[in-house]
Amino acid sequence: MLNDLLYLNWLTHGDVSPLPFPQSISANATHVLHFRSLVQLIEYLSVSINYTLVRFSDGVQRIPLNTHEKEIDYATIIVVNTNEDIWKEEISIDTAVKLLKYRFSHLNIIILPVDPEDKIREMRENFPTRLQRMKLWTGFSNAELLDTMDGYVDSKAIKEEDLKLFTDLLSRIQYDKLLFHVNADREKLWEALNKWDFDAFQFNLDELLVISFLIFERFIKPENSNNLKSFLFFVRDNYHIGNPFHNFRHAVDVLQATNMFLNSLIKNSNYKISKLDSFSLLLASLGHDIGHPGITNAFLISNKSPLAVKFNNISILENFHRFQFQRILIPFLNQSMENNLLSIEMEIDVPYLLDIVNYSILATDMAKHDEFVGEIERLITEFDNFKLLACFLIKCADISNVCRTLNTSCKWGLSLGEEFKQIALLEKFEKRNQTIRRNR
């Protein structure tokens, strides 16, 4: 198993301070880098979605993923120099460790010296295959030290003062320089996002991030553009790129469709849609499937997953999405409002915004589809009921891929079929395990 081994603040006067590693680390070929500052480390981790480790005859190298997206299946090990005399960061060592785990949990981070051998052993057992990772995320594995979805819900929120420090630190990074793979110019991307034949498969992950930025740009002041990109990087990272369907590409596809629906209604209908309404629903569209494990609610319920138990078998994934998205969204909103960086034309009501976001995300549960269809006639007269309208718009956008051009809709159909295939394999795997356990 490969390891991305990263030293933070370990270079002093040009020398590398030695550290004895557990055998489980030193016995493997690792990709080793040193970082003089927390910002440098964050920049490196922020573009990890575009890279993977590959073993060659002369060692391990980090290479770009130019032609395909790959789910990370190896550990990122960070060695933090705990010598306070050398630590030069403005936040404490303990806070830095907590915040790195909060921001980059998708990278399977191990921060030494916390239980490295046991954690690496569990990673070896739970990360080699896609199905094993799906089991881990949803709490079906025996892992105790690795991150799971129900563990995320139970985890304590970062202290507000620490989160503010970290959000400010993240916003100092120049995110434009981290977008390495934007081949299309702004004009071409803008043209694509304003057409119904939008094909999200034509664009790589960096270009999809820029497209999402172009949609949200009108809601912010120009000086807030870097903060917005910081937020979008955070959101993108929390989608599993290995999911064939429920990934960041799907999120941007739904975002683009919602944007077109809103623009059309504002121009051609009598519905009362404020700028805050549009902003809230577009945010919900971007985050509506964040952290999706590639498994259905039905699978979680039938197999009595810890997450299903936690949410009482009701809109399990949707409840998780809104919970995770809120943890990322609120610090961005607080930072933007504190520095007066949102559009001067938009009066921000955060409780209202979060209500629209949460309600809209919950509406994407297909188990509620008939319930909403029964409500559709209310929209004929209730022009000021944006909460209800938002639910219909995001639901239409969420399943609109079948209404794209034939070539594009076929790609989405194949992607969804592949995801269902993986679920079927996992169901077969779980049934076999249940049979073995019953026969013991």
Image: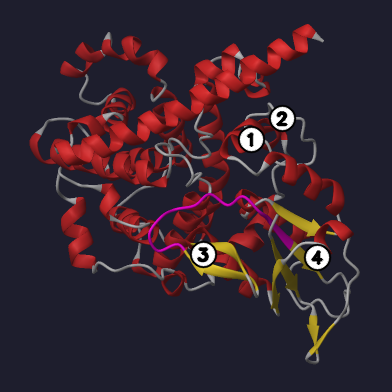
Amino acid type, label 1: Gln
Quadrant of residue 157 within the rendered picture? top right
The magenta-colored residue range is 65-77
Q: Residues within 10 Å of mark 1 (few under 14, many from 20)?
A: some
Residue receiving disc 4: 93
- Element under label 2? loop
* Marks 4 and 2, how far apart at CA: 31 Å
Q: CA distance from mark 3 to mark 2?
A: 29 Å
Foreground residue, 261 or 72? 72
Residue type at mark 4?
Answer: Ile
Contact between labelled residues 1 and 2, with CB atoms less than 8 Å apart: yes
Up the image or down, 89 lies above or below 286; here it is below
Quadrant in the picture for residue 376: top left
Visible in this render: residue 115?
Answer: no
Mostly what secondary structure, the magenta segment?
loop
Q: Kindly check if marks 1 and 3 are in contact, taking CB atoms under 8 A apart as contact.
A: no
Kind of residue indicated by mark 3: Val
Residue under label 3, please give it: 47
Q: Quadrant of the C terminus?
A: top right
**Above-or-below relation of 401 to 263:** above
Q: Which residue is mark 1?
A: 132
Q: Which residue is mark 2?
A: 141
